Image (cartoon, rainbow, N blue to C red):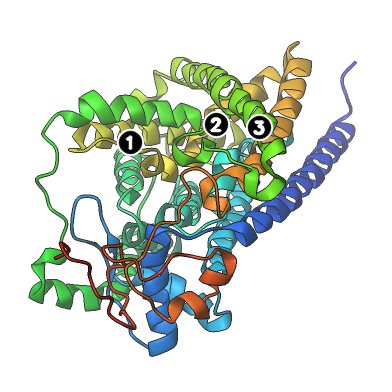
Amino acid sequence: MSLHPQAAVGRARGAGGSAGRAVWACFAAGLLLSLLMVWRSQVGGDQLNLLARGWLLEAQGRFISFGNPMSTGGKAPGGFTSLLVGLPLIVWPDHRAATLVVLLFHAAAFVILDRTLARIVQPAERLLFALLYWLSPWRFYYSGFLWNPNYLCLFASAHLATAFAQRRQAGFWASFLHLAALVLAAQVHPSALLLAAASALLWLRGYLKIHLGGAIAGFLAANLPLIPWYREVLGHPALLAEANKGFLGRGLLFSLPRGLFYWLRYASLSLAGRTGLFDFTEALGAAANRWLTRVFWLLSEVIGPLSVVLPLLGSFWLLRRYRHRYLRRFPAAPAAPQLDRAWLHGYVILTLVASAAVFIASPTTLMYWQAFILFHAAVLPLVLWSGLLLRTRHASKVVTGAAVYAALALVLTLGMTFGSPDYRCAGRETVVFPLCCDSPMFGQLHIQATCPWPLDQPGGWWPDILPKSRPVALTPGHP
């Protein structure tokens, strides 16, 4: 028996309403947990370099026109990070103020993505995206402490939303925001090149229309924080990154496989780097630490890697099912739900292809944070494949799997909140290390109150632009 059209519409609206309430319940739960992580966040080398720029703006009115030191040498271009860190410190002089802005960026990114995807996918797929994106341990990890890559979620969400808005017709403001997001993201972290490459390929294949006037205006507006940096570079060329790192072809051997692997891991429970160095002694005591570290080792080192199989299957499904469509340009046809869905498939695949080209061209080995700007696109293959399975006899397995994923993700995130180095003061391989000197910044931003640092250590490290309040007598043998 077929449903009456009005009854079908009513049922669809009811399903959409239920999914919407579940999405915002996930959002509220994730926001509370991220706030706890912000409260427990620690500061190390990169964080102190960022805080020094913000503190100099807040305390002394000094605008630093360049960002953090880069691994390839030189400094990150522009003073946008000085504004991102310094302006929150004016409101609340605490090192966690800037980290709250990171969390606000994450929340805004999710809202933008959810509002955009709600126009394309089914309500159940919208909820799956909330689980795999907002409740992901990867997003949680990047939401609660101060670091350049942690800001990138907002620019990535603007990239998708403004590209979707221009899938058929270019618009001044959408193009303005698209180009401004790319240029500002480049001032935060050089991995913005991945989004720029995706934009170029989307435009070439007809998935993105660009309004020339809006694009130029957005480019120029986002360049305003770079004007002092341009003047600095003319007098101090050492601020520029070195171009002779690595060797040609290194990316094909090292960065491409790692980049593709991180693409899969972002939609899984498999963590990387410092995130899995659990130590709960500070929070729960030595006795609890002994058995908890075993539990979280099993979760992060056994279950986590096994979970990569699911995004691998999702990516294979998307590549195989739609492999022929991307040889053709996106059709300039009237709006239709099926075409919008096809556009989203194309966005994901072309973003991956463009990123693979950047990985191959990279002269240095890719690290796990350097592809995080692709996180929003990396979770979509599993969302779309799972949405398809929900319409088959495998629906109950998908529902069970989603519930298990959400439960394990929250457990893993709680483990990071109390056991990972970036969220605890003591334990193995913490972010704390000796500093050579002293500065009022450590007291005024409550860094010492959060986690006491050993200061005035001869030969210790020091943030690159932070003035020293008093010199330290070096021991014999130190330069």
Q: Residue at x 79, y 47 (%)?
A: 25
- The amino acid marked with disc number 2 is Ala
- The amino acid marked with disc number 1 is Ser
Which residue is at the far front? 476
> Which of the 4 quarters of the picture holds residue 395?
top right
Location of mark 3 (residue): 290
In this picture, is 425 found above or below 420? below
In this picture, is 15 found above or below 388? below
> Which of the 4 quarters of the picture holds residue 63?
bottom left
Q: Residues within 10 Å of mark 2 (few under 14, many from 20)?
A: many
Q: Residue at x 42, y 52 (%)?
A: 149
Q: Secondary structure at mark 2?
A: loop
Residue 248 can be seen, yes or no: yes
- The amino acid marked with disc number 3 is Arg
> Along the polypeptide, which appears first: circle 1 or circle 2?
2
Figure quadrant of the N terminus: top right
Location of mark 2 (residue): 267
Q: Position of residue 338 (x, y in %)?
A: 58, 31
Q: Secondary structure at mark 1?
A: helix
Q: Residues within 10 Å of mark 1 (few under 14, many from 20)?
A: many
Which is in the foreground here, disc 1 or disc 2? 2
Which is in the foreground here, disc 2 or disc 3? 3
Q: Secondary structure at mark 3?
A: helix
> Which of the 4 quarters of the picture holds residue 104?
bottom right
Location of mark 1 (residue): 355
Q: Spatial distance from mark 2 to mark 3, Cα to Cα?
A: 29 Å
> Along the polypeptide, which appears first: circle 3 or circle 1?
3
